[in-house]
Amino acid sequence: MAITQKYGKNSSPDLVCHKENHQSDKIGVPGCHKKWTEQNTNWSRPVARIWTVVLLLGTCLLYCARVAMPICAVSMAEQFKWSKRESGMVLGSFFWGYCFTQVFGGYVSDRVGGEKVLLLSAAAWGAMTAFTPILAHFCSQPILSMTLSRFLMGLLQGVHYPSLASLCSQKVVENERGFLMSTVGSGSYLGTLVIGGAGSLMLDLYGWESVFYVSGLLSVLWAYCMWKYLLKGEGPIITLESLGSSGPQSKLSKRHWSRLFKQPAVCAVIITHLCTVSTFFTLLSWLPTFFKDTFPDAKGWVFNVIPWLVAIPSSLLSGCLSDHLISQGFDTASVRKLMQFFSMGVSSVFTLLLCGTTTFPWAIVFVSATMGFITFSHSGVSVNVQDLAPSCAGALFGVMNTCGAFSGVLMVYFSGYLIEATGSWASVFALITTVNLLGLCTFLAFAEARRVDIDSTKTRHHNIHI
């Protein structure tokens, strides 16, 4: 019992079992050696750093492939005679597909391994991106083929982030998760910058088809290199038997899932992530229009590039800071709350300052600060799900991301209605601040970092018998 008290409430029962039964192999305590084997699958620090770089590049290419269509939409609309409504249908179909595979991707990753799901999905959406020009030119109805291809792209890319969450919870120790997730998360901003710069150049020089060919083939190449050098050429085979078996990372029954969703900490994570994603989608969608309406003579590349240049180092900083605080002995839950306070609290201050902005330089400063602080959520709520339920982190993150995607689409539409109804951007920024504060207060009140995917009463009983 003394050992249990020393390691605290965040210790898993498997770890306690190992600590208190170092002679287990000799006396034959059932299951203890097996559980320690499962716990001892974490990457070493050098291996974790290699995977961090690889996953960063993968996320960067994910966004290159995702943003290729918005960049080329104007040129494609001119060539195929699309109306604004038809262009919007093509662009919006991605998000509907994106919502439907979040939970499934996390569920499969929890059972067979996130790296396998990442590999297969990357090869699929990379090939889909490369074949997009072919589908557009050889189909008699390009509007239908492009809408379908974007929907399939959403389905295939929807598994990416739940798989990352599952992989991180299985392979990365607690005090290094913040750096990995924040670094990999910065790949989205890097990918947006790369495809915005290089993609626009290729569009002008070689036509819109080249943007899809290059981003798609690079994604397939990334998947091949990951399979060849990190997975050592092992086939990413996912069988029905492996999906149906109760693997070590997915032992929760329907009753356990019901109990999980009754936990206040789990509900807080879902609500906070929903609010974070909704406000981010809204800013991402409407900030370019805000700058064009408010500062019509401003250079577009300035407000489309500078905020993302700030977001990348800010995301890396949040990961380093959170991991450093945890390694110094600070409570994990307190560190997650601090990161989320920066993400939703401090960023809201700069969002509100946009309401009274009168000059373009100050608007750039406030928007850059807003986007920079928002990235701190990579070390807050995004990692907290791995603290709470490492055995099903992928599926639970899928639930969070599905809710966030649906609410994000609705909030983008509602923001457009507010702009038309009030004629003022202040109403949109006030809405963003309100949603942020709702999510932040929920997280500060109910967030925890102890495991809730295990039965604590059974754990205590097990420890007493040992």
Image (cartoon, grey):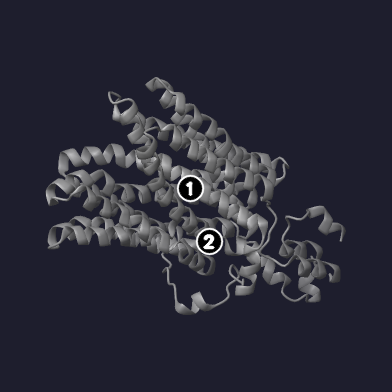
Quarter placement of the N terminus: bottom right
Residue 277 marker: 1
- Comparing 345 with 101, the one in front is 345
Quarter placement of the C terminus: bottom right
Q: Amino acid at mark 2?
A: Gly
Vertical placement of residue 371 versus 412, above or below: above
Q: Amino acid at mark 1?
A: Val
- Comparing 48 with 411, the one in front is 411
What separation in Å lies between label 1 and label 2 (alpha carbons)?
Answer: 17 Å
The answer to whether residue 336 is seen in the rendering is no
The answer to whether residue 149 is seen in the rendering is yes
Instruction: Give the x, y percent position of residue 97.
Output: 36, 61
Instruction: Give the x, y percent position of residue 45.
Output: 58, 49
Residue 394 marker: 2
Residue ID at (39%, 20%): 359
Quadrant housing residue 9: bottom right
Q: Dot 2: few (<14), some (14–19), or many (≥20) neighbours within 10 Å?
A: many
Circle nearer the N terminus (1, 2) = 1
Residue ID at (76%, 72%): 25
Q: Give SS at disc 2.
A: helix
Vertical placement of residue 40 versus 293, above or below: below
Instruction: Give the x, y percent position of residue 287.
Output: 38, 35
Q: Are marks 1 and 2 in contact (CB under 8 Å)?
A: no
Residue ID at (68%, 61%): 452
Q: Give SS at disc 1.
A: helix
- Left or right of 374? Residue 454 is right
- Left or right of 70? Residue 268 is right
